[in-house]
Amino acid sequence: MKILFVCTGNSFRSPVAEALLKKLRGDLEADSAGTHPASTIAPNATKLLKKMNAAKKLKKIPEGVDQKNLEEYDLIVAMGEEHKNHVIRKHPYLKGKIIIWNIDDPYFLSAGSDRRILREIEENVRELSASL
């Protein structure tokens, strides 16, 4: 099964979800992308994932959702409604493959919120992993 996580910059939320799912379920193919990819992975993503022994699973550079062949994925996990809408605008036939987690972008939150966001992502990844 192939799963794509989508956020805005592919710098924190979606690559963290990808790395955690890869750590938990090596039998699944996890990937991530951004609607407007950043130039680098967020340093705090690497730092936090090191503490969880998952940094090795973190991608090296952000990728854009438009670079992906979305038809290949069995499930697309959007971090927010805007990410789902971005995918559906270009690929309306994928609507049934998309779920939304509603996870805030730590880039726009106060310092230290990245740990809370990481815990939210981890909880959602564990639930998803158990359901597949």
Image: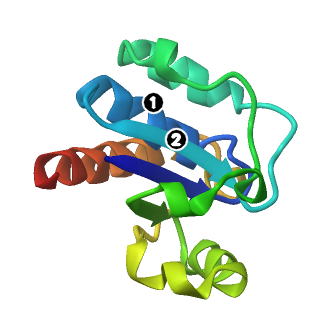
124 lies left or right of 57: left
Name of the residue lying farthest toward the right: 39
Q: Residue at x 43, y 39 (%)?
A: 30
Where residue 104 appears, x then y in whole percent? Answer: 54, 63
Q: Nearer the viewer, residue 76 or 121?
A: 76
**In the rendered image of this protein, does residue 33 appear above or below residue 66?**
above
Near mark 2 (Cα within 10 A), the count class, few <14, some 14-19 or many ≥20, is many
Where residue 24 appears, x then y in whole percent? Answer: 25, 29
Q: Residue at x 72, y 80 (%)?
A: 90
Q: Residue at x 42, y 47 (%)?
A: 116
Q: Nearer the viewer, residue 33 or 113?
A: 33
121 lies left or right of 103: left
**In the rendered image of this protein, does residue 46 appear above or below residue 95?**
above
Q: Residue at x 76, y 51 (%)?
A: 67
Residue under pointer 1: 19
Q: Nearer the viewer, mark 2 or mark 1?
A: 2
**In the rendered image of this protein, does residue 129 appear above or below residue 100?**
above
Q: Secondary structure at mark 1?
A: helix
Where residue 23 appears, x then y in whole percent? Answer: 32, 24
Near mark 1 (Cα within 10 A), the count class, few <14, some 14-19 or many ≥20, is many
Q: Earlier in the sequence, mark 2 or mark 1?
A: 1
Name the amino acid type tagged 2.
Answer: Asp
Q: Is residue 79 visible?
A: yes
Residue under pointer 2: 31
Q: Report the Cα–Cα distance between label 2 and label 1.
A: 8 Å
Name the amino acid type tagged 1.
Answer: Ala
